[in-house]
Amino acid sequence: MPPVGRQCGCFRYLWSLEAKAAETTHVEINTRGRTVLGRVTAGPGLASDIDLAACSAALMSRMKGREGSRHLVGFRVSADGSFHVERVEPGDYRVSGDIRRDNKRVALLDPILVHVPDDASDTEDVPFDMGTVTLNPGVNLEPGDTAPNFSSRTVDGKPLRLSDFEGKYVLLDFWATWCGPCVEETPYLKATFAAHGKNERFEMIGLSLDSEAQAARKFALDQGTAWTQGFLGAWSEDRIARSYGVFGIPAIFLIGPDGKVLARDLRGSGIKEAVTAALGLSSTIGSHGS
């Protein structure tokens, strides 16, 4: 199927859809909604020459009527920090975005939540002002860097600290039940755990960014994911994911016994391959998965 485009204000997204035989592929192109206004402000610690117009940003929301489906509306930021997004359907959205230089994230938007209300007026479009979003210095956690320690809770309310696994290889997975790509990694994570879960030198930890621990707990039970499941809470309020420079999920890291990152952005069969190589003391572990 050819690429499908969506015009979002002054920003266009293009993506490809794979149509499978005997299956229905749903495509929705939005041509209605209200205009959303806002402003990006530079937080403390940003370089004085930061170019706000280089910020790539989006509003992301769960689409009505289809569990796990997401509605992405991209937008650009002006040099003065102002932005407007056209044709935004009413609902709850998470704001996300960053600025990159030389393929490194130098600044990151606070992933705040915003509710876009219905337009109750009789006019065609009354803009909704969502206020300000802060742009903070970005985190670029790369292989060789020390993984930030954290203290949280499991989905069952038990204490969970990364430092408790010092001396082990740790596979860390930032995920959420509402994230389709996260769910798609489940078979690969299960294969990794089946192969290495009983190894005393290895630990797997999921870190759920769901708003309720029950959602992650139920998913783990339904899917038979037997590894440790931590709970971070809503992404917009979590600081642990931010300390790891997590802009999108799934975000899967492999951490060595010395607490340093061995690999990040692992995907698919690359997850098991990286863990197998690490436990085999291989000296050739890639910084990215397949």
Image: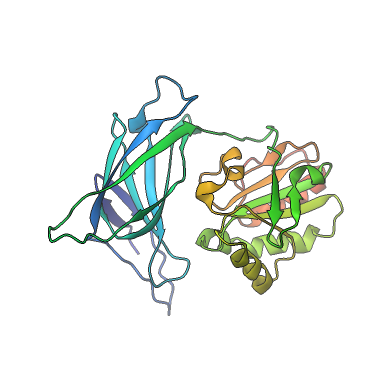
In the current view of this chain or complex, which residue is farthest to the right?
A: 200
Residue, x 39% and y 65% (percent of image)? 63
Horizontal side of 221 relative to 61 (left or right) equals: right
| Residue 70 coordinates in the image, percent (x, y) | 42, 61
Residue 290 can be seen, yes or no: no
| Residue 240 coordinates in the image, percent (x, y) | 62, 43
* Relative height, residue 126 to residue 138 (above, below): below
| Residue 4 coordinates in the image, percent (x, y) | 31, 58
Residue, x 27% and y 51% (percent of image)? 8
Residue 155 sits in quarter: bottom right
Horizontal side of 146 relative to 28 (left or right) equals: right
Along the line of sight, which residue is nearer the eye, 64 or 21? 64
Along the line of sight, which residue is nearer the eye, 210 or 11? 210
Residue 24 sits in quarter: bottom left
Q: How many marks?
A: 0
Residue 1 sits in quarter: bottom left
In the current view of this chain or complex, which residue is farthest to the left?
A: 123
Residue, x 63% and y 43% (percent of image)? 264
In the current view of this chain or complex, which residue is farthest to the top?
A: 48
Along the line of sight, which residue is nearer the eye, 41 or 190? 41
